[in-house]
Image (cartoon, coloured by chain):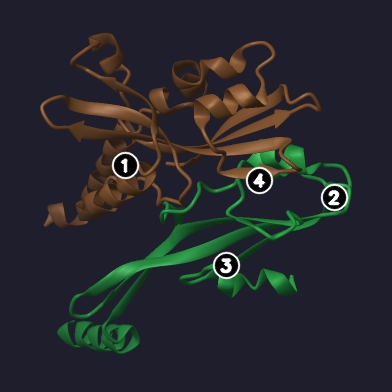
Amino acid sequence: MRWIRSFPLLIVLIAALGCAYTLKDLDETYIAESFVLGRWLTFIRGDSVSKDEVIQLLGRPTEVFEEGRILIYRLILAEEEIKDKGPYSFLWRSEYPVPAFNDKIPTHNKIRNKLASQDDALGAVGRRYDWKLYLQILGRQAEYSLVLVFDERATLRRYRLLRVKP
Amino acid sequence: MIIRWLYFAVFIFSVLNGCIYIPTPEHGDLGTRDRLEKTTLDPILAGKTTREEVLLQLGEPDFVDGEDRIFVYHWSMVVGYFYIWPDWEGIIPRQHFFLIEFDDHGNVKRYELKEFGGIGSLDKLDHDRW
């Protein structure tokens, strides 16, 4: 009956394995703010970026504060299987609040991607055309808040990309 | 020995009454924004921090009042699980709200972190009376 005494230990080990497996999946390299900025939004790092340029490239902002001095874009990074082309990752500008990505509820994610993709995608990466870029396709998906602050001449003064949802 | 176990079983079943509640530390996400950590909220100070700084620090609010005077950030966490015999199970959520009010100059006037259990929404928060 010695095995009965070690039963709690077995439960703890199984639970720990579950945790380890989950953590292994959480490779955040490609959803880190710095990576997303460098991969998808390099233009905002340039000198004298004007508000017009930003709106031309990103479209209508999700939120506007202080009479247009501060613009916010809700950006969704998502991956979807494209027929005959394989998985693509997209950066979407979404005007609609969308639920966070949840790898346990695929239906939920389909709704999420459908909601997010009602606006134009800002960019896409597919493995068929560039294997190196495919390697950068996300293991997970994320939502960001891009905050852009302009000066009185409508030139970009400060910005920050924040990951707000997993 | 068997009698003792029987008494124990009767006691346990009468207490549980077909329901098991397993409390856990806060974890997971329920489709809302990620938790705002204390370190993220610490730099926000009444009378000093501006609306611009709040937005750069926290991102897009989940709710904004008509005149940009009140921002609300909301996130939900799992704080436990329940099981009711025979086959009803689920999570026990806790709602967190970070409310900020700005003055006429766009500086933080006051802020508060509120939380309550259960399935919640901004309606339940009743920010108008905050």
The residue mark sitting in front, 1 or 4, is 4
Q: Which one is earlier in the sequence, the residue at label 4 or at label 2?
A: 4
Colour of chain A as rendered:
brown
Q: Residue at x 70, y 44 (%)?
A: A65
To which residue does mark 1 refer? Answer: A19
- Residue indicated by mark 2: B46
Q: Residues within 10 Å of mark 2 (few under 14, many from 20)?
A: some
Chain identifier of the green chain: B
Asked whether the beta carbons under mark 3 and mark 2 sit within 8 Å of each other, the answer is no
Q: Where is mark 3, residue-wise?
A: B122
Q: Residue B87 placed where, x, y %?
A: 19, 75
Can you say whether B66 is above or below B53 in the image? below
Alpha carbon distance from label 1 to label 3: 33 Å
Q: Nearer the viewer, residue A13 or A6?
A: A13
Picture quarter with the C terminus of chain B:
bottom right
Report the residue marked by disc 4: B38
